[in-house]
């Protein structure tokens, strides 16, 4: 593009940014991002032009404005967790329900298959894991795997893995939601086979009290990550009255918000798995309290609170 055409195409926008500066931090950040893109283009094709210097100065002023609004950004973070994320969650309660049903259905099918095929659990979990757990059971410590590493190392490894898995489930939504469904299938089958294995050894209740200390948050987050993937895929499949690219942008933006909201949950789940689950002989009341607290949080923040917030925001 010739420099004159580039200027003509964007000059009105630049003047608006210069003489009508935004006051909202989100809008200001959007203007800054837009200007950085224009500045990058100008530096590439017109590196010694006056327009490049002009854009550089304008972008710098907006950046300083963003910096000065740092306190407002703090409230923006609070607003995200208190209002913005729950509203997005409420918008996609249906997708969360679908993800829950898909995951639960595959888990039940896996447990049923394991009950009728002795080789199924080994095929899903692997011989190495099953043999190690068999040895732990024989030694009287069936959940010894959670004590096999240093607490901090285990926490960091599990947190990283859980976040990677959740983002893989989300990104797989690009494959028209089929990729996300496949990921939910794999994880659901693994959980179903895993849980059935302990029930078959007469350790069902004990496994629930130990494993679901961290599993409540972890599995709930995987299901919600699956919902985010369905949001992404469905935005491509069913754009409605919007252009497909606009629908994808909206679906991607909302999906990312859901994923950002899950990161702290995965970190807490990893902390519980690394530092708490290893105490498999803790008092039952303590285990039940942690389990119930985790379940209450998931139901309240991802189901009840978004509904209440929506009702509160409706005009009377």
Image (cartoon, rainbow, N blue to C red):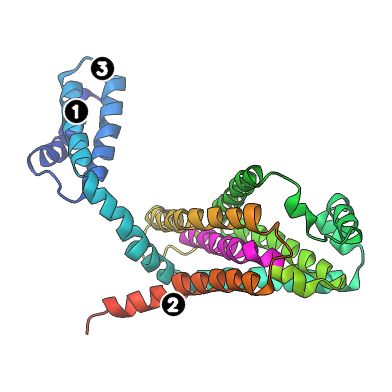
The residue nearer to you, when weighing 313 against 105, is: 313
Q: Name the quarter where the N terminus is drawn.
A: top left
Residue 178 locus on image (x, y percent): 62, 59
- Residue occupied by mark 1: 55
- Residue 156 vs 132, above or below: the answer is above
Assign a secondary structure to mark 1: helix
| Magenta stretch: includes residue 219 | yes
Of labels 2 and 3, earlier in sequence is 3
Q: Nearer the viewer, mark 2 or mark 3?
A: 2
Numbered circle sitting on residue 304? 2
Q: Main secondary structure of the magenta part?
A: helix
Q: Secondary structure at mark 3?
A: loop
Q: Cα distance, mark 1 to mark 3? A: 11 Å
- Please state if 40 lies on the left or on the right of 54 as rendered: right
**Camera-side residue of 41 and 157:** 157
Spatial CA span between label 1 and label 2:
47 Å
Residue occupied by mark 3: 47
Q: CA distance from mark 2 to mark 3?
A: 55 Å
Residues at circles 1 and 2 in contact by the CB criterion of under 8 Å: no
Q: Is residue 109 visible?
A: no
């Amino acid at each position: 593009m010739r420099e004159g055409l580039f200027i003509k195409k964007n000059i009105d926008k630049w003047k608006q940014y210069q003489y009508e500066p935004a006051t909202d931090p989100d809008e200001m950040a959007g203007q800054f991002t837009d200007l950085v893109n224009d500045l990058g283009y100008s530096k590439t094709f017109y590196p010694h032009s006056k327009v490049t210097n002009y854009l550089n100065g304008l972008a710098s002023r907006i950046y300083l404005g963003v910096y000065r609004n740092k306190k407002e950004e703090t409230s923006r973070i609070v607003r995200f967790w208190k209002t913005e994320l729950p509203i997005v969650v409420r918008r996609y309660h249906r997708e969360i329900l679908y993800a829950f049903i898909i995951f639960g259905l595959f888990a039940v099918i896996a447990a049923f298959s394991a009950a009728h095929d002795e080789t199924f659990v080994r095929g899903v979990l692997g011989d190495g894991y099953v043999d190690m757990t068999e040895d732990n059971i024989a030694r009287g410590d069936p959940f010894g795997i959670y004590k096999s590493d240093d607490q901090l190392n285990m926490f960091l490894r599990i947190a990283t893995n859980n976040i990677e898995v959740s983002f893989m489930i989300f990104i797989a939504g690009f494959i028209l939601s089929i990729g996300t469904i496949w990921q939910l299938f794999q994880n659901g089958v693994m959980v179903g086979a895993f849980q059935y294995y302990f029930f078959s050894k007469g350790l069902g209740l004990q496994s629930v009290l130990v494993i679901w200390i961290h599993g409540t948050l972890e599995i709930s987050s995987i299901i919600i990550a699956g919902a985010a993937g369905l949001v992404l895929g469905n935005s491509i499949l069913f754009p409605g009255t919007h252009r497909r690219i606009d629908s994808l942008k909206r679906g991607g933006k909302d999906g990312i918000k859901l994923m950002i909201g899950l990161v702290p949950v995965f970190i807490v789940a990893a902390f519980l798995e690394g530092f708490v689950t290893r105490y498999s002989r803790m008092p039952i009341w303590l285990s039940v309290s942690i389990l119930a607290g985790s379940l209450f949080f998931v139901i309240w923040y991802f189901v009840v609170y978004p509904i209440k917030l929506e009702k509160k925001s409706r005009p009377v």
